Amino acid sequence: MKTKRLGLILVCLGAAGALASGAAWAQSKPLRVGMTLSDIPTTSGQPNGGFEGYRMTGYTLYDALINWKLDDAQGPSTLVPGLATEWKIDDKDTTKWIFKLRKGVKFHDGSEFNADAVVWNLDKLFKKDAPQHDARQTAQAAGRILSLKSWRKVDDHTIELTTHAPDSTFPYQTTYVFYSSPAQWEKLGRDWNKFSQQPSGTGPFRLEKLVARERAELVRNSNYWDAKRVARSQRVILLPIPEATTRASALLSGQVDFIEAPPPDFIPRLKSQGFQITSNVYPHIWPYFMSFREDSPWRDLRVRKAVNLAIDRDGIIKLLGGFGAPAAGAVDKSSPWFGKPAFDIKYDPAGAKKLLAEAGYSDAKPLTLKVMVSPSGSGQMLPRPMNEYIQQNLKAVGINLELVTQDWEVLRNCRRAGAGSPICQGVHGINNSSATVDPFSAFGRIYSSKAIAPKGFNYMHYSDPKVDAMVETSNNTFDEKKRDQLLGELHAYLVNQAVDVWVVHDVGPRALSSRVRGWVQVKHWFQDLAPVYVAD
Amino acid sequence: MLNYIIRRILYTIPIAIGVSLVVFALVHLAPGDPLSAVVGEVDQKMLAEMRASFGYDKPLPVQYLIWLGSALTGDMGYSLRTGVPVFKTLIDAATNTITIGVAAALLGFIVGVTAGMLAGYNHGAWLDKAVSSATITGVSIPPYWLAILVVIVFSVQLGWLPSMGAGTPTSTWSWDAWKHMILPVIALAAIPCAIVARTARACVMEILSQEFVEALRARGLSERRILLHVSRNALPTVLAVMGLQFAHLLGGSILVETVFSWPGTGYLLNLAIFDRDIPVLQGTILLLALFFVSINLVIDILQTWADPRISRG
């Protein structure tokens, strides 16, 4: 009888506990995020959808060996230990990197993260005959960790990664590779499609529900290994709302709490209704990459400088509702890699005209430039009005700018194929926004002659032995400060050579309900959703 | 009648094959690489390897035959973007589109037929003038503009209804499901309602002026019975228009579904175009094209039933 009574009491206590936890759950409002993406980025490990994918289902569900510091809005984001606690170059062989793995980290399914999991994941991406090889994930990651040649387990918590050549920027490349749970993949019948529905990573959130093209519901991973980054919100709901007006309407009507990229003409209204508007410059550049091939007028330094001086960047930023930062080079002035260029990129139409005259252009013999532009695309901001504004600016100094509008994918294909390829339709340049997150993406892949398209991303066919040497030297410099200084010199040289037309940096505006707390917009493409929550 | 139906069904086979060929050709003739939107920052060499692994390196006729063969068995491949089978993606999207399409058709047709017939019957009266003005407005307003307008009024200003999405309903009949449908249904129903009303009005007016109506009146039939005769005579034309409008509604509206982020076929098509998700794009266009072919077939048969002279022609 006593046993029965005790059982009853325990059941009642259990029920009361469940109710209490239910009540606590109910008090915690979910954070509903309106993304600009048209779909939920893939969740199996390597997200698609560009860097927005990394923000939404990358650094939320997963970790990299090295993560980004995403809690300081003032300085540029730096690398911080992630699944690796430390990393160092082998003193004897500068192509070998030793990574010490964090102990005690568990995947969401409870299995252990260790060196075997790292090897398994790298095999998943780069070993075509591995059972876990997933071409879709490879497609997202391969271009971001190009230096990786091989990998090897040293012991359960140590891994050795080897690069093709000495590359001091390699740690940056490791931030793009996430680690999925081998145990979960086995449990789900070795099926990546099933895994994407029930993924298991190590991140501060785990996926609870996924409805393709509609929503993803992430819930807090209370056992997250970094106590400082345990999610404040019990639940984050990601909603793809590609149409900007719909996104803003959803925020205004209370259907979401947080939207990315509110349309500029909605911002005054959002502000007046008490919504928070945040922005910050980040490693993004909206440029014209121009052809340096034989027949291109861009080979003349005076022309390059003239075009850069002819553009009224403040006017363009006004057009963007104030949400942009003028570019004085490929990276922002606050970047440690900006350096001290002698050529000051500013609005100087008189100077531009003078340079054009020196280059032999006049009203009788005007310069004509053809640039391929897209009506939309990732990081392209408001391409049509911005390009038309530049067209007017250039017209004022005697340059005819012909805009060849093609869809975003054609533009990207042209960039991959390189200047002069048939898909580029005879244009002198392309308006293709670019990320400058790490030294490789900012410089090596764009300006090195080794990366001339179609081999790499040097669309322009730009080849300068001095730049190649500077890229090489910085890759071989493993002292971070010294390397940053060298990159500053490289950037200053590129600006002095006016290699591209650098127009503006995006500042990534976001609009948040007045009840959203904990949001820190850092100077990065990636942002941290873990500290963000909706106050009750 | 039966021969006519069989003949019409047989006609649809070459049409369907032609449609599949055009769909495939259109998608593949667009400039750019089939994989460019789904791969990250990879170089040309890597892209070529990816192309081979997805089968896009084969000659186009071979790709077409492989695709057609699989599609005939219901296997339309996998979405390049999500990895979800195209067939399942299409079924989910079509269910959502049909849901609001049927609701918009019911709303639009009931209101349109009633208003149109009353206007036609009361030709020249204030009711006719009011219906005519409303229908001219209805056919002139772009549905996406109306969609934005109803969102601003009912979601943003009044806060009565959600502005986007299908919500997370626990069942089809829950209030959460209904309230997400109301605004898209209104935006979708406006044009069919106006077109059907105008057609019904014109038909009723034309039939009322015919001699047989005078003969019916002379025989002493009540106005209600006369209206029934008029309705029966107006039916084939109104039915044809309703059928086409219904097909348009079920085909999904890219613009309206995009404004509301409604996860139907129109929205799916829009996303597939921008994502260049070729298997989804091919599957969606093929499904919509075949759907229109089937709807036309059904309308033809219904018209034959309503007016047997058609099959004799």
Image (spheres, coloured by chain):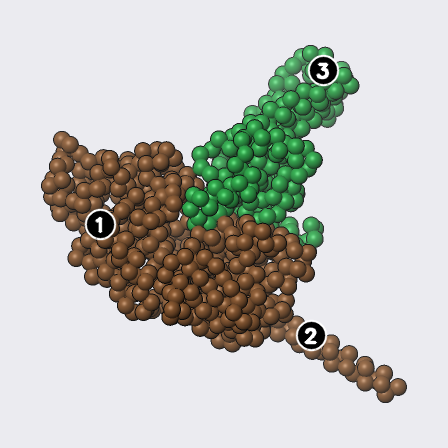
Chain colours: A brown, B green
Amino acid at circle 3: Ser
Q: Name the residue under label 3.
A: B311
Left or right: B70 as drawn, with respect to A285: right
Q: Which of B65 and B311 is in front in this view?
A: B65
Classify mark 3: helix, strand or loop.
Answer: helix
Q: Name the residue under label 1.
A: A498
Q: Residue at point 13% right, 44% down? A: A355
Q: Residue furthest bottom?
A: A2
Amino acid at circle 2: Leu
Q: Which of B303 and A422 is in front in this view?
A: A422
Q: Which residue lies furthest to the right in this view?
A: A1
Residue B32 location, quadrant: top left
Chain letter for the residue marked with disc 1 in the picture: A
Task: Measure how far apart labels 2 and 1 are at the Cα level.
Answer: 66 Å
Mark carried by residue A19? 2
Q: Residues within 10 Å of mark 3 (few under 14, many from 20)?
A: some
Quarter of the rendering occupied by the C terminus of chain A = bottom right
